[in-house]
């Protein structure tokens, strides 16, 4: 099936406002996301006229932190938007993976900084999002944050008021003025973003209740629980920013999105974070996340997506033959299963089993890295090297950097590179602080044995001994238990 010049490849799913398809632009040879407005909205000429104007306005928001709209059209009385295709995770997925734990301050600040940059562009063009929440903050494969669903929130709000007189939005992140039915402004988005910031720093939502009306009442009448009560380690500067954004009065929420971006940029620079995108990307890489939502059909571009079915008034038969599609999927999954089994057999054949720790040795866990390499304490270690080895024991070395070596003549130093999952663990070698994981540059050490300690707020302390050979360059990666 085709919509305009775009070829429909497959449905991604649908929500109450629109149906989303994966499409291809043959002219530019790129994948796109095509959002087809539901038929019950297409019949409302006033709403569609407003949406057409907003679509053109939003298309002008050419910013790296906003999902780009490429095209807008009508075919057979169905309005559709053609947008940038984001094959990645939402912030909600990342928050879920944290299981109620706060994110590191630098990661939370780097996330909100990117969102603030996107809202700065929207504010400059007079566009209000109205529904900022973790589900509408996506990350592409490079780790760049993208704000999605501009415009859809407005037309949905209009339709909701027309039908029921209710307000639309995500209750936990709505602003007081939205609850009271007042006109949203750019400070509305700042309040919602402040709620997202609060959630990143604490692992909790700022406003809750035992029902939706109770939650909405708390947003309007009660202050949020102090960030420091839920995360005593949170930075005071970031706490002050959150408190400012969550003020009940719109005029008290700071000086706009650009002000917020500048505040966070300065704070990140003062903490040595020169690349917020890479900083967030490294953190996300260390988490155990499900497969991309665009592949599993759970959520795409802020829309809850059911499994494939008859959607959006466009019959699946016009896109797929059911029987043919079934055999295609059987073939794909069969091939994937064969590949997985092949690699499992290959790895099993080429990797020896772990060496068990002797009884009553006091070693919590031991695994083989390669010849002569062991790790202990609640962590797993993996790595690769050109030469060198490491051994684990429970002894501590002195704070002075020394190396156990029988050689009496000067030897060429070796070098190590330390990583961990999750990242951002503090590194101490022979009692001396050496930054945090992942290391960006090689650390030179004298040949011999050195004591390594990793300290992470989300994991028990970990320590082990590593042995450095003359002239070796060795990379270690430790998986810390939580």
Image: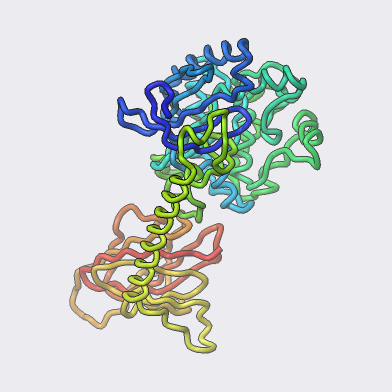
Query: How are the colours assigned in the image?
Result: rainbow
Query: Which residue sits at x=60%, y=34%?
Result: 133
- Whole-percent x, y for residue 188 in the image: 64, 24
The image shows residue 127, relative to residue 374, as above or below, that is: above
- Whole-percent x, y for residue 104 in the image: 53, 49
Residue 45 is left or right of residue 124, and the answer is right
The image shows residue 10, relative to residue 177, as above or below, that is: below
The quarter of the picture where residue 204 lies is top right
The quarter of the picture where residue 399 lies is bottom left
Query: Which residue sits at x=51%, y=36%?
Result: 316
Residue 395 in view, yes or no: no
Residue 343 in view, yes or no: yes
Query: Which residue sits at x=38%, y=63%?
Result: 338
Between 264 and 81, the one nearer to me in the picture: 81
**Total number of numbered labels?**
0
Between 204 and 336, the one nearer to me in the picture: 336
- Whole-percent x, y for residue 317 in the image: 50, 35
- Whole-percent x, y for residue 106 in the image: 50, 44
The quarter of the picture where residue 33 lies is top left
Which quadrant would the N terminus be assigned to in this image?
top left
Query: Which residue sits at x=60%, y=46%?
Result: 234
Between 166 and 335, the one nearer to me in the picture: 335
Which quadrant would the C terminus be assigned to in this image?
bottom right
The image shows residue 197, relative to residue 349, as above or below, that is: above
Q: Farthest residue toward the bottom?
A: 359
Residue 215 is left or right of residue 56, and the answer is right
Between 357 and 12, the one nearer to me in the picture: 12
The image shows residue 166, relative to residue 109, as above or below, that is: above
């Amino acid at each position: 099936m085709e919509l305009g010049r775009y070829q429909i490849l497959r449905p991604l799913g649908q929500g109450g406002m629109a149906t989303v398809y994966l499409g291809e632009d043959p002219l530019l040879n790129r994948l796109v996301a095509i959002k087809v407005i539901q038929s019950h909205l297409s019949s409302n000429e006033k709403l569609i006229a407003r949406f057409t104007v907003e679509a053109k306005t939003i298309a002008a928001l050419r910013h790296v932190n906003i999902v780009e709209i490429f095209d807008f059209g009508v075919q057979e009385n169905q309005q559709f938007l053609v947008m940038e295709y984001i094959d990645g995770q939402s912030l909600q997925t990342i928050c879920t993976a944290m299981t109620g734990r706060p994110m590191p301050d630098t990661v939370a600040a780097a996330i909100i900084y990117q969102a603030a940059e996107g809202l700065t562009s929207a504010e400059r063009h007079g566009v209000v999002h109205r529904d900022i929440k973790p589900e509408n903050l996506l990350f592409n494969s490079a780790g760049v944050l993208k704000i999605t669903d501009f415009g859809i929130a407005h037309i949905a709000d209009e339709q909701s008021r027309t039908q029921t007189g209710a307000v639309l939005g995500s209750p936990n992140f709505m602003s007081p003025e939205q609850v009271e039915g007042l006109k949203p402004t750019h400070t509305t988005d700042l309040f919602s973003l402040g709620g997202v910031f609060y959630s990143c720093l604490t692992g909790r939502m700022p406003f809750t209740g035992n029902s939706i009306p109770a939650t909405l009442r708390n947003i309007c009448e009660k202050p949020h629980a102090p960030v420091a009560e839920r995360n005593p380690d949170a930075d005071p500067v970031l706490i002050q920013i959150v408190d400012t954004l969550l003020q009940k009065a719109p005029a008290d929420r700071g000086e706009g999105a650009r002000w917020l971006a500048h505040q966070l940029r300065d704070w990140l620079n003062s903490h040595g974070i020169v690349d917020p995108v890479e900083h967030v990307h490294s953190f996300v890489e260390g988490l155990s996340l499900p497969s991309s939502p665009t592949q599993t059909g759970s959520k795409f571009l802020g829309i809850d997506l059911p499994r494939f079915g008859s959607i959006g008034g466009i019959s699946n038969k016009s896109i797929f033959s059911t029987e043919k599609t079934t055999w295609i999927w059987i073939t794909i999954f069969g091939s994937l299963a064969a590949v997985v089994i092949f690699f499992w057999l290959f790895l099993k054949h080429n990797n020896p089993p772990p060496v068990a720790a002797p009884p009553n040795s006091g070693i919590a866990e031991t695994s083989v890295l390669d010849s002569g390499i062991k790790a202990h304490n609640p962590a797993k270690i993996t790595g690769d090297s050109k030469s060198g080895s490491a051994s684990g024991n429970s002894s501590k070395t002195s704070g002075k950097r020394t190396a156990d070596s029988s050689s009496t003549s000067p030897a060429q130093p070796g070098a190590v590179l330390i990583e961990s999952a999750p990242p951002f663990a503090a590194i101490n070698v022979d009692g001396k602080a050496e930054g945090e994981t992942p290391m960006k540059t090689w650390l030179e050490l004298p040949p011999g044995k050195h004591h390594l300690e990793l300290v992470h707020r989300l994991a028990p302390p970990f320590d082990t001994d590593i042995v450095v050979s003359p002239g070796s360059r060795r990379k270690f990666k430790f998986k810390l238990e939580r």
